[in-house]
Structure formats: C-alpha cells, structure tokens
C-alpha cells in the first residue's frame, strides 16, 4: 500500500495526533500525518519572528495567522484526506475553519466528534465525507480504503 498524506485539523494543545498515528500504525496504514504548528508559542510568534515586531497584539495575531495560513494551505494541498478532530476541550474555531477549507477544495473529510457535539456541528457533519465519534474509528475507516 502507498503512503497516504493526512491533514490533521484540530487543536494543538493535546496529543490527539499521536493517538491517531498509533491507531493507524496498529492497522498497518502507511500515513504521513501533517497539520498546524503544534508548538503553541511558535505558532503565536511566527509572524513577528519572520516579519519583525508588530505595532500591537491585533497585528501580531494577524501576521501570525497569515503565516500559519500559508502553512495550512500548502500542507492541505499535499494531503489526500483531512481528519478534523473536535475534542472535549479547547476552542475549536481553527478546526472548523480548516474543515471548511478541506471541503471547499474537495478534500475528503473525516469529521471526528463526540455525541455531545452533534447539534453544534450539524452543518459541518452534513458536508463531511464521513463522521465518526473516535480517532480509532477514523483510523479504521482510513484502513478500509486500502483493503
């Protein structure tokens, strides 16, 4: 089986990507999992790191977001699949934005969300290729592609 490139959209504060990788490995799925910068301080400071000191917090955030958007677009265009994880904690605006971008570019989307988020994510659920409740289920669905 060939390697699949998966864009892992979701919060960067927990190790959920490692859990997804472990499930994929256990199922012998050869996958490269890419995604947003997982070092939070680097993600926040990258705009100023590249472009220099900004005149205030609004511009610092905006320049950081633009550099991070460049990363997201490039990596998402390399991907063959997007897994969007809505976990139990943290704000999920970036996850929703990335999932919408994946749908807009025609990238198959596996939406991972718990039962408690059914109502909140109903619109995105309707656009997803597949919706599951766990990362293990997402990995099983990806493995199925290669049976």
Image (cartoon, grey):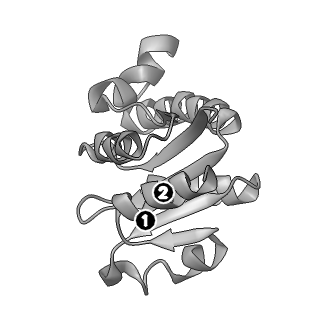
Quadrant of the rendered image containing residue 136: bottom left
Disc marking residue 55: none
Of residues 141 and 44, the one drawn nearer to the viewer in this rendering = 141
**Badges 2 and 1: C-beta atoms under 8 Å apart?**
yes
Q: Is residue 31 left or right of residue 80?
A: left
| Residue at the extreme bottom of the image, as rendered | 119
Quarter of the image with the N terminus in it: top right
Residue shown at the point (36%, 58%) measured from the top left: 135
Q: Position of residue 102 (x, y in %)?
A: 65, 53
> Can residue 93 be seen from the camera position used here?
no
Residue shown at the point (34%, 65%) measured from the top left: 134
> Can residue 120 be seen from the camera position used here?
yes
Q: Position of residue 125 (x, y in %)?
A: 55, 76
Q: Position of residue 80 (x, y in %)?
A: 67, 43
Disc marking residue 84: 2
Provide the secondary structure element on which disc 2 rests: strand
Q: Determine crowd level at label 2: few under 14, some 14-19, many 20+ residues with C-alpha closer than 10 A.
A: many
Number of numbered discs on residues: 2
């Amino acid at each position: 089986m060939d390697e699949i490139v998966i864009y892992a959209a979701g919060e960067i504060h927990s190790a959920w990507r490692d859990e997804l990788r472990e499930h994929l490995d256990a199922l012998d799925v050869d996958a490269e999992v890419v995604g947003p910068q997982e070092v939070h301080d680097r993600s926040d400071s990258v705009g100023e790191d590249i472009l220099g000191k900004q005149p205030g917090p609004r511009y610092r955030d905006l320049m950081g977001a633009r550099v991070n958007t460049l990363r997201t677009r490039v990596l998402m265009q390399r991907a063959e699949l997007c897994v969007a994880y809505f976990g139990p904690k943290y704000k999920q605006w970036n996850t929703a934005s990335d999932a919408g971008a994946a749908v807009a570019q025609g990238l198959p989307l596996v939406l991972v969300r718990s039962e408690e988020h059914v109502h909140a994510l109903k619109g995105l659920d309707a656009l997803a290729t597949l919706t599951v409740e766990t990362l293990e289920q997402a990995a099983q669905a990806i493995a199925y592609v290669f049976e």
